[in-house]
Amino acid sequence: MSERTLEEMRVAYEALEARIADACKQSNRPRESVLLVWVSKFHPLEAVENALQLGATDFGENRVQEAVEKFSVKRPGVRCHVIGPVQSNKLRHAATVADCIHSVADVKSVLKLERICGELDKTLDILFQVNTSEEDTKSGVSMAEAEQFLLSLPEAPHLRYRGLMTIGKNTGVAEDSREGFAFLRHLRDKMLARGGVFQDFTELSMGMTGDLEVAIEEGATMIRVGTALFGERVYPPKI
Ligand SMILES: *Cc1c(COP(=O)(O)O)cnc(C)c1O
């Protein structure tokens, strides 16, 4: 597979926007209530440049190194989202490049991010990843432990706890993700109602190319879309 040209990407983007608009209409939600995060992982800088020409403002990368390569030079009005699990020794790079980290799942990382962001004199948005598919291969806090985990979070003046993230079930059937998405929404509502450190806990990052309609119906405020925009990813060979 070769990279899409700007024109191919424009066609893909328009088709995706039609899907998003339909899903919003279906659930009586304004289009502006759903942020599209363009997941550019494994695609080159040229793909990002094309996306920018189409008006993309938010990009998602799941590896910190790749995020640094493409987004450490800040562009005005453009935000970088780190959406994959971050090893402890990469938190500093992640906190530096990212405007939002979607995949925090342990208190130790929260404490380290707070310290780093204090040093950087920066306020960072973070989301907590919940493993709603209960597949061992996916990271995140388990559904059974999620609420306890959230209640154990410290006050962190340099972090803004913004909400929850999950990856739907990867069965090929979008409906299979619905239960997990609904779980995430209920948990978000519960925490937001507590106020305090959860006063800004409004976000639900859920829905990808295969299940974004279900996610929007269940209240997603951010959808993370790669394949539908950029085409198939070519993964580097494992050495
Ligand atoms: C790769 C990835 C996506 C995008 O998936 P597509 O199916 O290509 O849209 C979304 N979220 C996360 C966490 C990812 O790693």
Image (tube, rainbow, N blue to C red):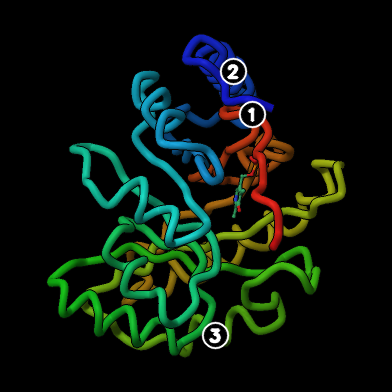
Sequence-earlier tag: 3 or 1: 3
124 is higher (above) or lower (below) than 111? above
Q: Amino acid at mark 2?
A: Ala
- For the image, the number of numbered tags is 3
State if disc 2 and disc 1 touch (CB < 8 Å).
yes
Where does residue 125 sit, x and y in percent of width and height?
33, 62
Q: Which residue is mark 3?
A: 149
Spatial CA span between label 1 and label 2: 9 Å
Q: Quadrant of residue 98?
A: bottom left
Seen at 65% across and 39% down, the residue is: 233
- Tell me where residue 63 appears, x and y as whole percent: 50, 59
Task: Say which residue appears at 47% left-offset and 47% top-offset.
Answer: 60
The C terminus, quarter of image: bottom right
The image shows residue 228 at horizontal and vertical percentages of 64, 29
Can residue 34 be seen? no
Amino acid residing under circle 3: Phe
Residue 30, percent from left and from top: 47, 28
Q: Residue at x 42, y 26 (%)?
A: 51
Marks 3/2 in contact by CB < 8 Å: the verdict is no
Q: Which residue is mark 1?
A: 231
The residues tagged by marks 3 and 1 sit, at their Cα atoms, a distance apart of: 36 Å
Is 19 rendered above or below residue 134?
A: above
- SS state under label 2: helix
* Front position in the image: 40 or 179: 40
The residue indicated by pointer 2 is 12
Q: Quadrant of residue 108?
A: bottom left
Asked which secondary structure carries label 1, the reply is: loop
Q: Is residue 27 above or below residue 176?
A: above
